[in-house]
Amino acid sequence: MEFRLLGTVAVETYTGPLPLGPAKRRSLLAALLLSANTPVSVGRLTDSLWDDTPPSQARGVIQGHVSRLRALLVGADAEAYGVELATLGDAYVLRAPETLVDAQRFEELLMLAREQRSPGDTVLMLKEALSLWQGPALSGAFAGPPLKAAAHSLEESRLATVELLARTYGTLGEHHRAAALLSAETAAHPLRESLAAELMLALYRAGRQSEALDRFHRTRRLLADELGIDPGPKLADAYALILRGDPGPPAATPAAPAARARVSSGPAVPSTASPAATEVGAVPVAEPPVAGDAAGAPPVVRRPPSSAQPAVHLADPLPVDLLPRAPRGFQGRTAELAALTRAAAGESPVCLVTGPAGVGKTALALQWAHRNEALFPDGRLFADLRGFSEAGEPAQIDVLREFLLALGVPPRRVPESAPAAAALFRSLTGRRRLLVVLDNARDSATVRALLPGGTDCVTLVTSRHRLEGLIASDAARPVPLDTLEADDGTALLAGVLGEERVLAEPVAARRLAELCGGLPLALRVTAARLAGRPQWTLAALADELADERGRLAFLDVDDTGVAAALRLTVQHLPPDAVHQFARLGHHPGGHVDPYAAAALAGTDPVAAAAALERLAAAHLVSETAPGRWVLHDLVRLYARGLDPAAAREALVGVLDHGIATALAAADTAEPGGEPCFVLPDGFRRPAAVRDFADRAEAMRWLSAERENLALAAQAARDAGLEDRAWRIILLQWPQVVWRVRDNWTPLLELALESARAGKDAYAESRVRTLLGWVLTEEGRAAEAAALLEHSPRLAREAGDPLGEATALINLAVVRAELGELPAATENCARAVELARREEDRHTEMLALQHLARMRLTARRPEEALAHARTALDLGPEHEEAARRSLLLAICGEAQLALGQEDDGVRLLDRAAREAEDAGYDEGAVRALEVLVRTTAEPSYRVRHERSALRLATAP
């Protein structure tokens, strides 16, 4: 049930709005709501329902409307919401929790907005407050003088909020958005000088000075024509500021007003005073109208003795304490305890401790609560909300009843409905300094109903979910909790087992902490096993835990342990998130993105991203970077056990995703290169493959995914999927070429094993060719020659002429390295012929590059220059950046050899610059080495040192 005053006066229910009937009945409801929980006399109601002399039967008419309104409320089960329309002598009172009245929620959101430290959060709160408005206040009611005054006050509150939102936009530098907001309001209220002034400043700061000045002159003329007055100080000051070209004082973040009054379930209403007279960012609030004022308006800013109940006299004034005992063996968490202290320092703070199951959220909350007992002289309340328990969550009324009884409320005075009990709880805590600990919360709505009302109260919430709704609505301050560092984990073991036992096996103790993944729950279970078995050594248990197949079983004791905790988290997830979670357990790599997750689960990236968000909210996965998700090792083991039969299907899906994406990356990084191979048998094409905008993006992906791709290749080899293993490795060739000295040999040797195991001549030839070239670059020429010797023949057997050409080129390079220059030149020439026959410019360009280098080595600079120029003519300038750099360097060296020093230096400098621009440090170093030997220009030496340093320190 919800009462609406900010728009058409209405009562909303789950089945729709109640049929309130004529305007006078809506007027009656509005008058009662504006003074909710406070008796309203028949005389006051008469003034609200008639604007002239009321009829002689006015009292009877009011009684009839009250009777009909009461019947409507009873029929809508209003009692369950703590709502009651009662008669008190010559007056009526509408008792209702303040949270059910939109005007009161509007006020609460304004109060919350003022308390935000971040302008961005303030904007969120103000926008939510304004979204409650559905039209002019008190629409649909017959507006007698008191209601007219109240509607005017509410509208003033809305306009002041609009101005505050615009100023906050200005704080964020979003002046265009502020101008758009104010333009609409200024059109509706053209004579409101404060709106016009704010709009002028927003336009001016958005770079629209002429529009700002035009707004001033239009408003000035309108004031003169309509009211016969000149612009007031605020409008004149804004005009002068714009004329001076002064940016004005920096916008201030919203500040709390010096004094604040509240409606009893009604709005905080700003006065009609110009906001210019108030502090920047503060919404002015009206004082209650005094008796006998000209408007005769009802007191719309009056607080009743209690929220929805008669005054309750507490039976037990002593401090209450429902807090469980402090945790034993608590270790570390210094930074998190300090963060909690900072978070608790604000007004009515809600501190939110979040993290995965077993990470120690409750222990942290209780430790902080016991350490800071002195801060809460009125007591400490605690409730386990069992959000992730098989026993289910307790009813809100049960939690509130326990709180109210602890606060001294007699059992017979505890309301039966949760909303009424919540209202009484807020009222009773309004002047107290209490700590309320809400443990194991599952959702934001449950927490909101249990928040205390006092500004000096602190609420400490723990949850496995992020509870972002609570952050948005109640400015909860999150304190995320991660796993323990190895030293703290070892100290936790020592706290349970005794320092002597841990000091006797320090290496084994640290290993145990690492195998438990720094998860306090796992460490406590491990310590419990060891404490009960003094004959066991820490090293022996560490060996047991090292076996992944039994690790989770060892980390469970009775009904307590990692698997049990994770099970309770997972059982609250929707089926699609559980399916995604189970498939993530079969991922061979260290991290996933939505594309890989989709391939694992057989869905699309959009669905996978949504599932990952749900899993992250439950702290089952962590987002370490935008679009990059990881699982804790123990969580991965648990997920893997949820659906073991799907292991091979999930693996094939993610392997084929890796192949498809690496193909796209290689094609983008080296668009002139030929596809390495046909797709494997039974290839499962992913629902979507990542697009790469340019070469740099493709190379970044190959670099970031190198470890994942290596793990995927090893998993494919272990699973007998050799046709996938060598493909995933070979497709990284652009990165291999770019970072040739970056220890690629072990991975390529794995690819060679896979190719041989699959008896695939094509694959073996291709892998030998690339591996041989890498060995050559590593200075292992003899090994490279032995490996490459068979590569051309294998390519011919496989019917792969381009593979044969590439193999001949790499064999030629190593033969030249070994001093066999004639044979090397012959191999390169043969490779040029094969590439031309296949009309493959990329391979021909590569062969000509090496042939040119060999001609230069043979002291034939004219031939070297000719071959290099022919190669350069084959490729467009925007492609093959590395190749062009090397060819330009050869041309430059050839020119030097021919005695044309100026041309040679110019070409070498160009080669170095193109390599530097492309990030190809290898090529830059080669060109600059020649320049340093050739000329005394100091800049070349500086550039050479920088490129060499980048090459040496490259990841």
Image (spheres, helix red, strand yellow):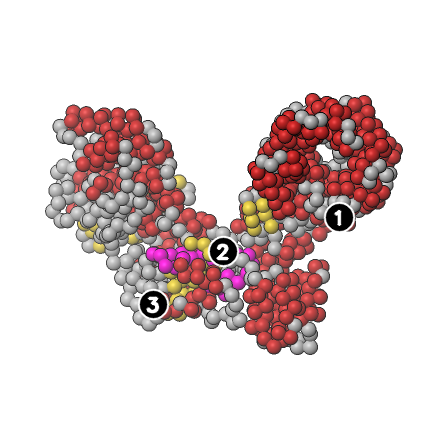
Q: What amino acid does circle 2 point to? A: Pro
Residue at numbered disc 2:
480
Q: Disc 3 vs disc 1: Cβ atoms closer than 8 Å?
A: no
Q: Is residue 380 above or below residue 235?
A: below
Residue 855 pos. (x, y %): 78, 29
Residue at numbered disc 1:
746
Q: Residues within 10 Å of mark 3 (few under 14, many from 20)?
A: many
Q: Nearer the viewer, mark 2 or mark 1?
A: 1
Look at the image and say whether residue 353 sits in the magenta stretch. Answer: yes
- Distance, label 3 to label 2, CA atoms, is 28 Å
Q: Nearer the viewer, mark 3 or mark 2?
A: 2
Q: What amino acid does circle 1 point to? A: Pro
Look at the image and say whether residue 347 sits in the magenta stretch. Answer: yes
Q: Residues within 10 Å of mark 2 (few under 14, many from 20)?
A: some
Tag 3 secondary structure:
loop
Q: Which residues are magenta?
A: 343-365
Residue 813 pos. (x, y %): 79, 36
Residue 903 placement: quadrant: top right
N-terminal of the pair, mark 3 or mark 2, is: 3
Return the residue nearer the eye: 872 or 345: 872
Residue at horizontal 69 percent and vertical 37 percent from the top: 734
Residue at horizontal 23 percent and vertical 49 percent from the top: 301
Residue at horizontal 28 percent and vertical 32 percent from the top: 245
Q: Is residue 767 visible?
A: no
Residue 196 placement: quadrant: top left
Residue 930 pos. (x, y %): 66, 36
N-terminal of the pair, mark 2 or mark 1, is: 2
Residue at numbered disc 3:
378
